[in-house]
Image (cartoon, rainbow, N blue to C red):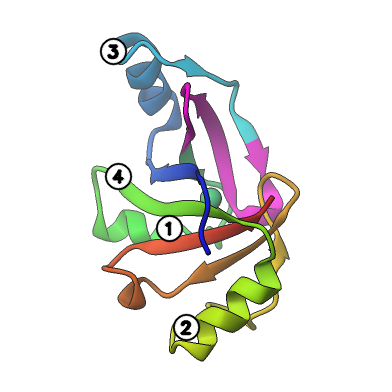
Amino acid sequence: MIGRLNHIAIAVKDLAGATATYRDVLGAKVSAPLPQPEHGVTVVFIELPNTKVELLEPLGANSPIAKFLEKNADGGMHHVCYEVDDIIAARDQLTANGARVLGDGQPKIGAHGKPVLFLHPKDFCGTLVELEQV
Ligand code: CO
C-alpha cells in the first residue's frame, strides 16, 4: 500500500540553528523558512536527491509539536511520511486491520497542499506516520 518516502520531519526548538547545521555541516540544500500558521509550525525544506527532510519549529500557542519538544529537549524525529495513491482506500484498509487514525479520521490538507492523515505511533513501532496522497 505505501509507496515512496515523501519526507522525514524533525522537530527543533531553534530553526535557524538547525538549518545552519544542515546547510553548513551536512552540506545540504535548504529552503528559506516558511511559516505555516494553519499547521502551527514554521518549516524549512531540505531537498535530498531521493527525499526531503523537513525541519519543524513551533509557531503559535497551540503548536502540535510543542509537547514533543517538551519531552525531547534536543529536538528529534517527529514523523515519517509515506505516499499513497488513494488515501481513503488506505485509511479503510488500515482501520480494518486495527490501526488507529488520529483526529476525526478525515484527511486534512497538509503542508504540501495534498490530503494527509496521521496514524497512531503506538501502532507503528513508536513512530508517528503521516500518509500523503500524491
Ligand atoms: Co509531514
Of badges 3 and 4, the one in the foreground is 3
Marks 1 and 2, how far apart in space? 22 Å
Query: How busy is the neighbourhood of tag 4: few (under 14 within 10 Å), some, or many (20 plus)?
Result: many
Q: Are marks 1 and 3 in contact (CB under 8 Å)?
A: no
N-terminal label among 4 and 1: 1
Question: What SS does tag 1 mark?
Answer: helix
Question: What SS does tag 2 mark?
Answer: loop
Question: What SS does tag 4 mark?
Answer: loop
Locate residue 127, reporting x and y percent.
33, 63
Q: Which residue in the protein does label 3 denote? A: 25
Locate residue 84, reporting x and y percent.
60, 58
Of badges 4 and 1, the one in the foreground is 4
Locate residue 132, reporting x and y percent.
62, 56
Q: Are marks 4 and 2 in contact (CB under 8 Å)?
A: no
Q: Which mark is residue 75?
A: 4
**Residue at figure coordinates x 33%, y 70% from the top left:** 124
